[in-house]
Amino acid sequence: MRVLITGASRGIGKSLAKYYKNIGYEIYGIARDKDKLKEVCDKYFVCDLSNLDEVSGVSKKLSNIKFDLIILNAGISTPHSRDFPPIDAFKKVIDVNLLSIHALLEHIDFKDSKLVFISSLASLLGAPTSLAYSASKRALNSYAESLYFAGIDVVLVLPGFIKTDMTKNHNFYMPFLMDLDDAAQRIVKIIEKDKFFNPFPLRFYYIIKLFTFLPDNLKRKILKKYAKSDIVE
C-alpha cells in the first residue's frame, strides 16, 4: 500500500506519515525540509509548494506511480490580524492551500486512489482576521466537493484548532484546542469511515453552524467586534 502525503515533515502530515509507516504503508512525502522528510518517509520530494512549477515537476515524477491514499495536508496561513494582507502574502496562501493541490494532481493517476483533503472549520465562516486562510479553505471545500460528485473517492476533513507550528504563536483563545496526536488519530478514523464531510470536534462545528443561522446584521456586529479586538501584539 502506498500513501502520498503533502506537508509530511511536521505537524499533522508527519503524525500521519508515522502512523501509516508503522502499519506497513510505503510513504511518499512532499515538503521543504529534507532532513525531517527522511525521518518518516520511504521516498520523498523536497518541494516548495508555493512554487507551482516545482509542484508540477514533482507531479510528473509521480505520474507512473499508483497510490492507494493521497493526503493533501500541507497548508499555511498569514498571521491573524485586522490588517488587510498584502497581495504577495495572500497569493502565497492561495498557492499552497489550493493551487498546489491541482498542480500536484494534474499528472497523477488518482482515479483509483482515495483523496483526503485537510481543510478547516475556519472554511465555514469568513473570519475577518484570517482573510486568506478562510478563503483558501472554503475554495478547497468546493474543489473537493466537485471531485466527489465527479465520482472520485474523496474524504474532506475539517478540523478545529490543533497544537501545531501554525497555532503555537496564536495569542488568542482557541476553543477546543486539540493535541496533535489526538487529532491525527481522529483523522485516521475518519479516513477509515469513508464519509465525505467530516468536521471535528463536533461541539465546535455545531457552535459555528448555530452562528451561521443568526441574522446577518447580528453576525456582522459580533465579527466586527471580534476583528477590532487586540488579538495580535
Image: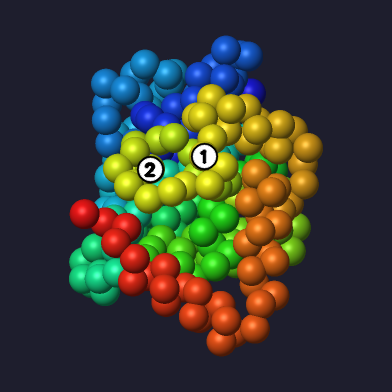
The percent coordinates of residue 225 (x first, y second) are 41, 73
The percent coordinates of residue 140 (x first, y second) are 53, 61
Q: Earlier in the sequence, mark 2 or mark 1?
A: 2
Does residue 221 appear anywhere in the picture?
Answer: yes
Quadrant (top left, top right, bottom left, bottom right) of the N terminus? top right
Q: Is residue 199 left or right of residue 58?
A: right
Name the kind of residue labelled 2 in the image: Thr
Q: Give the crowd class for mark 1: few <14, some 14-19, many >=20 residues within 10 Å.
A: some
Question: What mark, if any, has residue 167 been given in the picture?
Answer: 2
Q: Is residue 52 left or right of residue 6?
A: left
Q: Is residue 72 left or right of residue 76?
A: right
Quadrant (top left, top right, bottom left, bottom right) of the C terminus? bottom left
Name the kind of residue labelled 1 in the image: Leu
* Residue 232 image-quadrant placement: bottom left
Q: Residue at x 63, y 62 (%)?
A: 208
Q: Is residue 5 above or below residue 215?
A: above
In this rendered view, identify the residue nearer to me: 203 or 194: 203
Q: Residue at x 58, y 27 (%)?
A: 182
* Residue 184 image-quadrant placement: top right
- Kindly indicate whether the residue at mark 1 contacts the one at mark 2 (C-beta within 8 angstroms): yes
Q: Give the crowd class for mark 2: few <14, some 14-19, many >=20 residues within 10 Å.
A: some
Provide the secondary structure element on which disc 1 rests.
loop
Q: Is residue 221 left or right of residue 194?
A: left
In this rendered view, identify the residue nearer to me: 50 or 45: 50
Q: Residue at x 65, y 45 (%)?
A: 200
Does residue 132 appear anywhere in the picture?
Answer: no
Question: What mark, if any, has residue 177 been given in the picture?
Answer: 1
Between label 2 and label 1, give the one nearer the viewer.
1
How has the structure been colored for display? rainbow
In this rendered view, identify the residue nearer to me: 123 or 224: 224
